[in-house]
Structure formats: structure tokens, C-alpha cells
Image: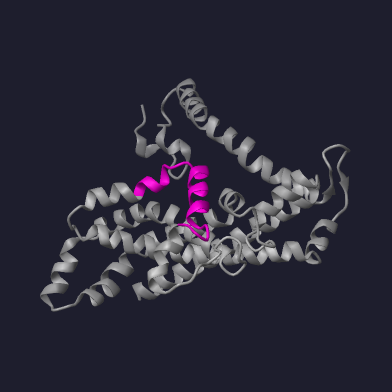
């Protein structure tokens, strides 16, 4: 019987000795395919299949009652002339940028605070993570009450001299309010990710820097930030993709108002497809949203790759 090193390297067969009988090797491959097959089918049926179907549907006119009619790029051309789509597109970009920046900053700040090993660290950690297990519908209803002109948010701000703010009915404050709720909801989750990265940094680095007289700012800038770069990259990409797909939060808190100030592309897809029965146009908007998510991901990958190369140099 041949040993494993005699097998062909760089392929699946590298783990199967070539000297084994053919029916043994075939059985092992079939077992492997059997374990992989459910995942492959899941992705084909629920991920890539609907994605390809939506791309094909975006070139048609389809109202769910008649057979789809091919219209070429008409759906995409009409989007550029639609002020509602342009407003939703701008709202989506603002929402992604604002949510991503603040989720990353607040998540990192919370992780640094929890990692300081102060009293009540575990209780604080559990309390912040509870925001992720609360039902999203309950969260939205509670925040609608808190953002009421006579709600708790204005009551807290009133001692600071801030007048009554109609958070959810003013187009200037509705989107910041939605971003604030998003940060409150998801920053603790990413705080756990940052905390795992902080705990992986060897304490010897900080001890050596302290012996050399380095202050907190220098240690944070020269040790913590560079070594957290892969974690930061993960948080930024995931937060941006999460923000791009957000639907329930603005839908339940403001319904897209006032005057469409908080209507994002995912809401416009829902309204176009299920309220106006324009499935082809809704599919075209979903393709645009997919392209935006891809562009954000590629830009972030390039920026962080360049930063890592500069840090290594």
C-alpha cells in the first residue's frame, strides 16, 4: 500500500493514497461529496440561483400576472430619470457611510473600555450584547417611543439646552436617528469582534513599550491599531454589507418618511415589487444595490491591503 506522500499533491486525491483499491478511493470521494452536497445545494437554491434569476428578470417587464416580456436595458435607463430612485440611492450611500463609520468607532471604543479590566466588565459586556438578542420589531417600536417629541431622548437632552426635536418627522434628523439606532443595535456585536482581536495581541508588546516610556496614545497608534487592522477590515466590510441590506429598521421606525428622507434602496425594491407589481424594475434596483455592495467591498479591500503593505514596509 502506498503512503500519503506518494499521492498527488495539490488535489483532493492528495489525502487518498494512490495504492488503495479503486472502490475504497471512490467510496471516500462519495462520502466527501455527500457531506458537501447539502451546502452546495443550499447556496445554489437560496443564494446564487435567486441572484441569477433576479439579474435575468431585470431585463424584463413582469407584473406577476403575465409572462415576463424582454425589454433590454429599459428598466436601468428609467432608473436614472427617476427622482425617487436617486433620492433612495443617496439615502442608501449616506446610511452605509454613517453606519459603518460609527459602528466601527463605537465598537472599537467599547472593546477598549471592556478590555481595560475595570470593575463590572463582565456585566457591562453581557448588558451591551443583549441588544443583539432583542427582537428587531420590539427595538424599533421602543425607539419610536423614545424619539417622540416628548420622549426620553429629548428629556435627556433638555438639561443641555437642546430644544424639542421632532426626530422622526424632520427630514434633517430622521436619517441620523435611524443611524443612531443602527449603531446602538450592532456596535456591541462588533465590540465582541474587536475584543477578540485585542485579547489576541501579546501583552509583552505593551509591557516593552511601557518600559520604554511610551504613553497610551503611542501604544494605541503603534501597537493596537496596526495589529487590529485585519479585524478592522472584517468589521468595516461586514458593517457596510449589513447596512446596504438594511430594511426593517427604517421601514418600521419611519416607513421611509418624512418625504422619502429615510427610504433606502431595499425599501424601494419592496415597494416597487410588491406595491406596484413591477418585478422587473424591482430586480433592476436590486442589481444596482448588489453593485454598490460590491464596489464598497472592493474599495475597502484595496484600501486595507495598501495599509497593511505600508505597515509591513
- Residue 53 appearing in the image: yes
- Confirm whether the magenta stretch covers residue 237: no
What residue do we see at 42% from left, 68% from top?
Answer: 158
Q: Is residue 10 left or right of residue 130?
A: right
Quadrant of the frame with the N terminus = top left
What residue do we see at 30% from left, 56% from top?
Answer: 195
Q: Position of residue 32 (x, y in %)?
A: 48, 29
What predominant SS class does the magenta segment belong to?
helix
Q: Name the colour scheme.
A: one colour
Q: Which residues are the magenta region?
A: 129-151
Q: Is residue 129 left or right of residue 91?
A: left
- Residue 56 appearing in the image: no
Which residue is the extreme one toward the left?
A: 211
Q: Position of residue 208 (x, y in %)?
A: 14, 71
Residue nearer the viewer, 156 or 241: 156
Q: Position of residue 118 (x, y in %)?
A: 18, 58
Quadrant of the frame with the C terminus = bottom left
Which residue is the extreme one toward the top?
A: 23
Amino acid at each position: 500500500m502506498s503512503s500519503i506522500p506518494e499521492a498527488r499533491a495539490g488535489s483532493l486525491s492528495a489525502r487518498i493514497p494512490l495504492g488503495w483499491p479503486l472502490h475504497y478511493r471512490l467510496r471516500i470521494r462519495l462520502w466527501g461529496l455527500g457531506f458537501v452536497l447539502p451546502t452546495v445545494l443550499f447556496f445554489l437554491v437560496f443564494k446564487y440561483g435567486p441572484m441569477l434569476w433576479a439579474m435575468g428578470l431585470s431585463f424584463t417587464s413582469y407584473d406577476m400576472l403575465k409572462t415576463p416580456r424582454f425589454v433590454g436595458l429599459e428598466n436601468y435607463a428609467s432608473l436614472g430619470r427617476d427622482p425617487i430612485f436617486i433620492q433612495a440611492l443617496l439615502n442608501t450611500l449616506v446610511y452605509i457611510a454613517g453606519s459603518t463609520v460609527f459602528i466601527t468607532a463605537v465598537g472599537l471604543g467599547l472593546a477598549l473600555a471592556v478590555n481595560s479590566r475595570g470593575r463590572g466588565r463582565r456585566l457591562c459586556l453581557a448588558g451591551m450584547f443583549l441588544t443583539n438578542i432583542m427582537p428587531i420589531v420590539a427595538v424599533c417600536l421602543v425607539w419610536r417611543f423614545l424619539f417622540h417629541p416628548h420622549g426620553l431622548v429629548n428629556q435627556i437632552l433638555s438639561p443641555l439646552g437642546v430644544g424639542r426635536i421632532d426626530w422622526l418627522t424632520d427630514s434633517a434628523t430622521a436619517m441620523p436617528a435611524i443611524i443612531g439606532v443602527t449603531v446602538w443595535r450592532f456596535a456591541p456585536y462588533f465590540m465582541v469582534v474587536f475584543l477578540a482581536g485585542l485579547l489576541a495581541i501579546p501583552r509583552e508588546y505593551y509591557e516593552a513599550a511601557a518600559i520604554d516610556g511610551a504613553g497610551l496614545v503611542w501604544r494605541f497608534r503603534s501597537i493596537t491599531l496596526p495589529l487590529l487592522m485585519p479585524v478592522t477590515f472584517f468589521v468595516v466590510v461586514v458593517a457596510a454589507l449589513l447596512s446596504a441590506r438594511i430594511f426593517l429598521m427604517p421601514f418600521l421606525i419611519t416607513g421611509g418618511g418624512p418625504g422619502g428622507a429615510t427610504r433606502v434602496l431595499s425599501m424601494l425594491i419592496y415597494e416597487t415589487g410588491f406595491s406596484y407589481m413591477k418585478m422587473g424594475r424591482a430586480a433592476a434596483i436590486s442589481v444596482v444595490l448588489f453593485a454598490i455592495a460590491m464596489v464598497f467591498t472592493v474599495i475597502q479591500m484595496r484600501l486595507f491591503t495598501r495599509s497593511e503593505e505600508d505597515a509591513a514596509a
